[in-house]
Amino acid sequence: MSSSTVPSSSSASRTRRRSAGEVVLGVDTHRDIHVAAVLSVSGAVLATDEFPATAAGYRDLLKRARKWGTVRRAGVEGTGSYGASLSRYLLAQGIDVFDVNRMDRADRRRRGKSDPLDAQNAARAVLSGRARARAKSGDGPVQIARMFKLTKVSAVKARTQAINQLKAVLVTADPVLREELAGLGNAELFRTCAQFTDARGREEVGAESMVQATRITLGLLAHRIGRLSEEIREVETRLTRLVERHAPQLLDVVGIGPDTAVALLITVGDNPERLDSEASFAALCGVSPVERSSGRRNYRRLNRGGDRQANAALHRIVFTRLRVDPRTQDYYERRIKEGKTRREIVRCLKRYAAREVFHLVKQLQPGPRS
């Protein structure tokens, strides 16, 4: 690893001897190339260089960084995107990896913007303690669930689009065809439309050709909806089996089903030990209280930050419990009598749900290192 701060080979060797202790690695990640910086614990820049985003590049990066000292900590930008593979490699080598946000805008205006500066900033964020979020390992059952969840979300979106298109075609269809399909529920409508593609036999001319084209279009859309529905059911089955195998304790909680459990597990990641406390998990889910007090008015508002998918999962838990759980219903009635608003009560219930989920996910075993 080269360094612009090392003017000669003799001075380089002296610097290396002085920094033979612990060093910190910072990496600015991109799709094809990563830029790395090695800093001493005192903040001195020892070296910067760029590496290809390949398995060989990762090995070379760590090999050169270790020439300057012992690497125990690393700050990586984009541990959930371009830096995901590098983070998994560093974690497998026993290095603590911290997720680093982009450089502060005010600092960027003063110092400028470059990849080496971003890499140095990532290392300094670890040294100063500003970067405290440990990177997700991304190599266990939760990563598998994330892949399946991604597939399901895209399939649901495509199916919704196909359903909307089918109904939009019906709006402009021939009145006779509309009357034929009027009053059918969605399931029966799709089955009926799917049969239209079996009657493509003869080509119509004149006014009737438009009717034929409409029938074929409805049939193709109905077949697409059917295929996507089957794909969604298959992915849901796989997700359910995954939760039952790796986190069955979540399914025993009132208000948590497979889909909600998957959303919470994805937020936690494969290494739940990185969450220090239930307060950190609540902040991660966006359910920690935010002070808005002023003068004699003491008030806390809903947290608008955090992982919104996890927040939505806790929201579903709370509203399910409000319908079916007597204990939650009693709590709601008691707080209403105390003068609390519905929004304040829901905020409190989501915080309690986050506490319960945190203690359950902490029982999960960390994912295997590959």
Image (cartoon, rainbow, N blue to C red):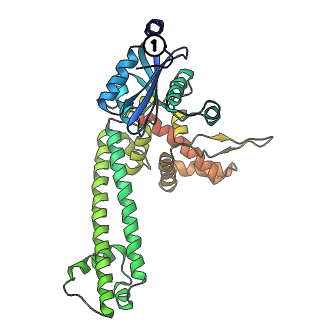
Q: Relative to residue 60, is residue 218 depicted above or below?
A: below
Regarding residue 365, the answer to whether it shows in the image is no
Whole-percent x and y of residue 343? 62, 52
| Mark 1 Cα-neighbour bin, 10 Å: few <14, some 14–19, many ≥20 | some
Q: Is residue 223 left or right of residue 307?
A: left
Which sits in the foreground, 121 or 284?
A: 121
Please, which residue is most extreme toward the front here?
8
- Frontmost residue, 222 versus 317: 222
Picture residue at 36% right of the left edge, 65% below the top: 159
Q: Residue furthest left?
A: 201
Quadrant that contains the N terminus: top left
Q: How many marks?
A: 1
| Residue denoted by label 1 | 22
Task: Give x and y (percent) for residue 54.
Answer: 32, 33
Q: Is residue 230 left or right of residue 26?
A: left
Image quadrant containing the C terminus: top left
> Helix or strand or loop: what does disc 1 sit on?
strand
x and y, in percent, of residue 160 in the image: 40, 66
Q: Vertical placement of 32 versus 240: above or below?
A: above
Q: Is residue 271 above or below residue 25?
A: below
x and y, in percent, of residue 175 in the image: 39, 90
